[in-house]
Amino acid sequence: MNLFLRSHKVLTVHQEFVADGINSAWHFAVEFLVGQANEKSGSGDGRKRIDYRESLDPESFSLYARLRDWRKQVAEQEAVPLYTIFTNKQLACIAEERIQSKEGLRKIEGVGAARIDKYGAALIELVVTAHEKNDEAPEQPLSTDH
């Protein structure tokens, strides 16, 4: 029902509990506009979800996935929500730009001095390590078939 409500332009919802012994149930009447989708899609709060696997190149997405894993570990250790460490958008920006300095982190929207002081060194180390691993990856040999 929530999916339906999110995907349609809903005008009103009427709900009523009908008590009838073992046949008791909630009844809903939904008025909506036919052929008009709700502008709110994705997260249910008006923001559209971004599939970073599609919007980032494979190398950037690999780094983004590592950054998300790191963020999850930190959030679990500190018992805080993930987004209080860094948002997905911020991590995607770090991965895409390969940010390797505190000055670079300062340029990201919503990343302030407190977060940089607390997480900056660990985050930069992750980015640098990932970058070095990619530089060390052996190149594919050229085919010698003629």
Image (cartoon, rainbow, N blue to C red):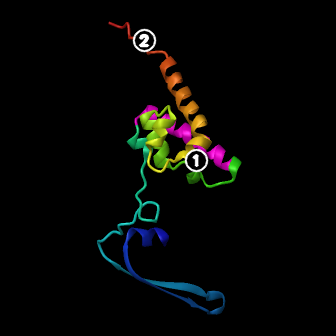
Relative to 53, is 80 above or below? below
Please identify the quadrant where the C terminus is shown. Answer: top left
Residue 6 is drawn in which quadrant? bottom left
- Per the rendered image, the range of residues in magenta is 57-76
How far apart are labels 2 and 1 at the CA level?
A: 46 Å
Please name the residue that numbered disc 1 is placed on.
114
Residue at 46%, 67% in the rendered image: 3
- Residues 134 and 102: in front is 102
Element under disc 2: loop
Relative to 86, is 132 above or below? above
Residue 89, horizontal then vertical, whole percent: 46, 48
Main secondary-structure element of the magenta-colored stretch: helix
Element under disc 1: helix
Residue 75, horizontal then vertical, whole percent: 64, 49
Residue at 56%, 42% in the rendered image: 116
Tell whether position 60 is magenta: yes
Residue at 58%, 53% in the rendered image: 84
Count of marks, rendered view: 2
Please name the residue that numbered disc 2 is placed on.
141
